[in-house]
Image (tube, rainbow, N blue to C red):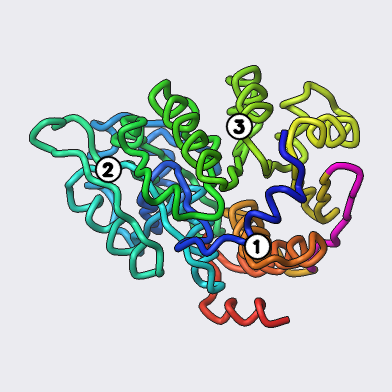
Amino acid sequence: MRSFREILGRVKNDEAEYDIVGIGNAIVDILAPVDVKFLTKHKMIAGSMALIDAKRARELTGLIKPEKKMSGGSVANTCFVAAIMGAKTAYLGKVADDALGKKFGEDIRQGGVYFPSQALKSRDNPDLLTARSIIMVTPDGQRTMNTYLGACTQFGPEDVIEEVIKASKVTYLEGYLFDGDLAQKAFYHAANIAHNAGKSVALSLSDPFCVARHRAQFHDLICKQVDIVFANENEICSLYETEDFDEAAEKASRDASLVALTRSEKGSVIISGSERVEVACVPTVVVDTTGAGDAYAAGFLAGWTSNRTFAECGRLGSVVAAEVISHFGARPLPELKEVMNF
């Protein structure tokens, strides 16, 4: 395990083209207003998230009148938000060469994120569509999600663009993508490229159920290849199979050089070696918690790659997360870039 001083020194002395390159599930979020009767008629449980196949994805897409379509996915959101804050970001993810694949590319590029990934050819993969999360929003603001992963499942080592990894201060990996064997190989490949180039690797644990499915593999990846771990309280406790947050945090700090752990209204805890910093949350009116962790990571990494202190990085993460959860959607307002000047 490299010390934080070692990886920080490399960031300071490095003139990388990108601050952050993300690797994750490239998903298009399709938001559509519906009433409760629509959910009942089409056998959906209000407030739930269901994984669906291509047939169901096509069916639901034809039944709704989308209000908004935008690039999504956890790490894609982080890269998008960090770009708004002024960070130089890139993103690698798999889409199909269909209408939604084009929409994903257009949207994320308009946000200032470099997206060089090649799309799957539909003629060769007719049953693999661009991934989408069809989000039904009822009048009470509740979201019911139907997610089709499609082309995302084909992201493999050949999709890791070496030149982009080498040109980025930190490569940020999305835990959700870890479900596939191809993606796991891609993670190790990307991490090896980054470390051989003297760069850093970060990982989001993404979800406690995801952690439970791959606990041993996640732990192995962290110990061997990850410098920075992002997780919330439930995820880090799941990884170390304990209900004691402090125990889990202490174990994580032994396995990774830098750990940033979010605890909702309790703020966040940042640990590197013997140094521990606690950062308060930023009070706000909670409207929609979607994307809070993604936003925190964006703020933290935007600060970290510009050589801020741990306290400043955590504060930036808290400010961005508070802004995102104060309205619907996982994207902040453009004015958020001003927070980098505090």
Residue highlighted by disc 2: 130
Magenta segment boundaries in residue numbering? 273-282
At label 2, which amino acid type do we have? Answer: Thr
**Mark 1–mark 3 distance (CA, rounded to whole Å):** 21 Å
> Of marks 1 and 2, which one's residue comes earlier in the chain?
1
Name above or below for residue 335 compared with residue 162: below
Q: Is residue 229 left or right of residue 45?
A: right
User: Residue 162 lies in magenta, yes or no?
Assistant: no
At label 1, which amino acid type do we have? Answer: Lys
Which mark is drawn over residue 225? 3
At label 3, which amino acid type do we have? Answer: Gln
The residue furthest top is 216
**Residue 167: x, y in percent?**
44, 55
Who's the residue at 60% across and 32% down the image? 225
Who's the residue at 82% across and 56% down the image? 267
Name above or below for residue 125 compared with residue 17: above
